[in-house]
Amino acid sequence: MTLLTFENNIAAPSNPRTGGGQWTTRCNDIQPLTSTVPREYVHRSAIAEVFLTGYERLGDEVFRVTAQWPRAHSFFTTSDGLSHDPVQAAETIRQSALLLAHAEYGVPLTHNALVWSLGFKTEPSELLIGANPSDLELIVVCRDFAWQGNRFSGFIEVTVRRGNRVAATGTGLFSCVSPAVYRRLRGTYAAASSSSLWDVPRPAPIPAASAGRVFPTDVVLSPGDRPGRWLLSPHFGHPVLFEHPNDHQPGMVLIEAARQAACGVLEGEPFRPTGIETFFHNYAEFEIPCWIETEIAHSSDPDVRVVQVTGRQGDVKTFEATVTGTVADH
């Protein structure tokens, strides 16, 4: 047994079991301790949802960000439980952009983030869960990170390494605006809150297996009025998708809807998503039905499936996504 003492000059007590001998380690003799980055830097309320553990600058616009994925997560999971969820890469990339914007480029924590695009590709063999949590190294290249008045914007290119191998790559385009600007952008919708909708009844979700999920509570789609079309209907009390109040459907909910819609339109095939490229055009509001439509695109590889997903609220296109994946048993 080793007791860590943070009083460097205090003599170590005797081991009560053996009657003597030191059993302490001085604070300045131990390795640096690991912790997450401040949750506020990645716009999360729960420390458990912070995946980043630190960062350092490598060059003018290049950073090394460290992260860790737990062996098990309540939402980011796969049907067999043996691999990390590829969508977890999207959340990790999102967090890295926010961390650097706040910690290195001076964006106030009170600013609101607007995500315009977020994309990722994963290598399934590098997502297998091991005997320990997965420690990751992200090499983040910041493109055009700059202020224009009180608006900050930037584009990131990210390579996610697990050990010496690439587990994922991704990009993101985002901007940050002051609370006053955000209120003007949102107008009357700024007063909306997902926390006030927890008890509002929602349509029954589609079966979890059809959506590529394990638990019904994680399903964000309800049946539509024709094949290949669904209604966006997440549970507003979901502890991860709505881990803090929002005034619109979060981007990660829309990415999840794209993943589930692709699984749904390919139901009957052992489809495994490996990447999603998403472009956000307009806010998806709570009060307006958001229809998720799909179209299977051509793929020259018989083992690969590509699905185009579009979200619409009336005549307004909220987002577009391209979901790519493999047929697992080929």
Image (cartoon, grey):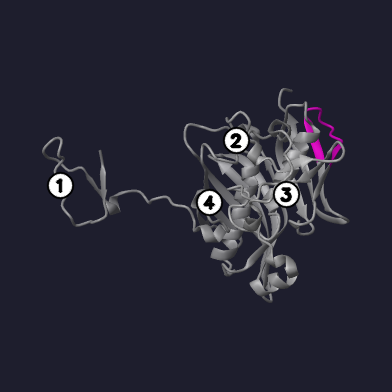
- In front of the other: label 2 or label 3? 3
Looking at the image, which residue sits at the far top? 329
Residue 213, above or below 119: above
Depth check: give the residue in front, 211 or 149: 211
Query: Is residue 296 found inside the magenta-colored segment of the image?
Result: yes
The first of marks 1 and 3 along the sequence is: 1
Which span is picked out in magenta? 294-307
The first of marks 3 and 4 along the sequence is: 4
For mark 3, what is the residue?
254
Depth check: give the residue in front, 6 or 264: 264
- In front of the other: label 1 or label 4? 4
Quarter of the image where the C terminus is located: top right
- In front of the other: label 3 or label 4? 3
The x and y percentages for residue 32 are 37, 51
Could you tell me which secondary element the residue under label 1 belongs to? loop
Label 2 environment density (alpha carbons within 10 Å; few <14, some 14–19, many ≥20): some
Q: Amino acid at mark 1?
A: Pro
- In front of the other: label 2 or label 4? 4
**In 3D space, how far apart are the residues under numbered discs 2 and 4 (Cα atoms)?**
19 Å
**In 3D space, how far apart are the residues under numbered discs 3 and 4 (Cα atoms)?**
20 Å
**In 3D space, how far apart are the residues under numbered discs 1 and 3 (Cα atoms)?**
57 Å
Q: Amino acid at mark 2?
A: Leu
**In 3D space, how far apart are the residues under numbered discs 2 and 1 (Cα atoms)?**
45 Å
- In front of the other: label 1 or label 3? 3
